[in-house]
C-alpha cells in the first residue's frame, strides 16, 4: 500500500441498459432466472461478500420494473439515474460515491447480467487488489484459437493467445482514481468496454485475478439458459 488506509469497499452495478442484443420486450437484467430476476441473483452474490459495505444500482430514467422487485438485498443502499452508455452510468455512480464517501474508498464495478460470479472469486479479487494500488479485475486465460480476419471474413493470421485474457467483472479500483481516469478520456469514454481500460490509459497496470469460465455475462437467450443450469 502507499500509506493510505484500506478504506471501505463499495459496489456499483450498472443496470441502465436496454439489452438491444438480447432482444425481447424486457431488459435482460429483469428476465426470470430460476425463479428470480437476473439482477437479484447478482445482487445476492455481492451482498454475501462480507467486506463489501454497500451496493448502488444505476437504473435507466425510464425504468418501471425496479420499484416492483422483491427480495432486494439489504446492502443495496441507493439507486441512481444511469446514462446512455455503460460508462456514463458508472461515472454517475462514481460521482455519487466520491461526493458521499472518501475518494480513496475502493469500488467494485460488476455487471448486472453476471449472476454466476462466485463469492470465492470476489473475495480473491479483493484480497489481491488490497496489496496493490493499481487495482484489478477478474479474468480467465484465453484457451480458444483466435483468428484475425479482414472485412470480408477471410483469415489474415492466427493470433498468439499465450498472453491473452478475457476480462470479466467485478473490477476493483479506488473510486476517485477511476472517476478521474474516465473523466480524462473526455468523449472517448463512450468507447470503453470496461473500467480497466480507462485505468490502463491513465498509466495504471491492473492485476489480472484468475476467475472461472462460468462467470458468464448474459448477452443472449442461450446465455440465460446456460446461467440457469450453472446456478442449479
Image (cartoon, grey):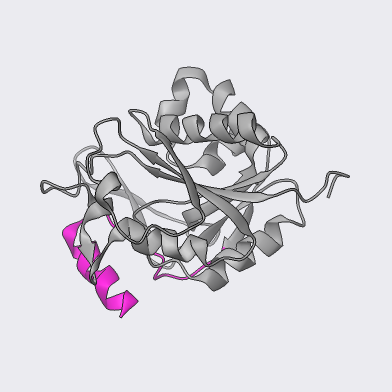
| Residue 145 visible in rendering | no
Closest to the observer: 184 or 92?
Answer: 92
Quick check: is 221 in the magenta stretch? yes
Closest to the observer: 4 or 50?
Answer: 50
Q: Is residue 30 above or below residue 176?
A: below
Figure quadrant of residue 174: top right
Estimate the x, y position of residue 105 in percent, counting from the top left: 69, 43
The quadrant of the image that shows the C terminus is bottom left
Closest to the observer: 219 or 150?
Answer: 219
Q: Is residue 182 above or below residue 73?
A: above
Residue located 77% across and 57% down the image = 131
Identity of the residue furthest to the right in this view: 3
| Residue 68 visible in rendering | yes
Residue located 20% across and 69% down the image = 225
Give the residues in magenta: 210-232
Left or right: 89 as drawn, with respect to 27 = right
Residue located 71% across and 46% down the image = 134
Left or right: 205 as drawn, with respect to 72 = right
Left or right: 190 as drawn, with respect to 66 = right
Residue located 24% across and 32% down the image = 62
Estimate the x, y position of residue 121 in percent, counting from the top left: 55, 68
Identity of the residue furthest to the bottom in this view: 232
Estimate the x, y position of residue 149 in percent, counting from the top left: 29, 45
Quick check: is 207 in the magenta stretch? no
Identity of the residue furthest to the top in this view: 186
Figure quadrant of residue 217: bottom left
Amino acid at each position: 500500500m502507499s500509506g493510505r488506509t484500506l478504506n471501505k469497499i463499495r459496489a456499483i452495478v450498472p443496470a441502465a441498459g436496454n439489452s438491444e442484443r438480447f432482444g425481447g420486450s424486457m431488459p435482460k437484467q429483469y428476465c426470470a432466472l430460476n425463479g428470480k430476476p437476473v439482477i437479484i441473483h447478482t445482487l445476492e452474490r455481492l451482498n454475501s461478500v462480507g467486506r463489501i459495505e454497500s451496493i448502488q444500482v444505476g437504473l435507466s430514467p425510464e425504468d418501471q420494473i425496479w420499484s416492483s422487485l422483491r427480495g432486494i438485498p439489504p446492502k443495496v443502499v441507493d439507486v441512481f439515474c444511469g446514462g446512455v452508455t455503460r460508462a456514463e452510468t458508472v461515472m454517475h455512480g462514481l460521482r455519487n460515491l466520491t461526493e458521499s464517501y472518501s475518494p480513496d474508498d475502493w469500488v467494485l464495478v460488476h455487471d448486472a447480467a453476471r449472476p454466476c460470479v462466485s463469492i470465492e472469486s470476489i473475495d480473491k479479487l479483493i484480497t489481491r487488489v488490497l496489496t496493490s494500488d493499481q487495482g484489478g479485475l477478474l479474468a480467465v486465460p484465453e484457451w480458444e484459437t483466435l483468428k484475425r480476419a479482414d472485412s470480408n471474413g477471410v483469415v489474415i493470421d492466427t493470433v498468439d493467445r499465450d498472453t491473452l485474457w478475457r476480462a470479466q467483472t467485478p473490477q476493483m479500483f479506488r473510486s476517485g482514481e477511476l472517476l478521474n481516469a474516465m473523466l480524462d478520456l473526455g468523449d472517448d469514454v463512450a468507447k470503453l468496454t470496461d473500467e480497466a481500460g480507462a485505468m490502463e490509459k491513465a498509466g495504471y497496470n491492473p492485476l489480472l485475478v484468475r476467475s472461472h469460465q462460468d462467470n458468464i455475462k448474459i448477452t443472449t437467450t442461450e446465455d440465460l439458459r446456460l446461467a440457469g443450469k450453472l446456478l442449479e
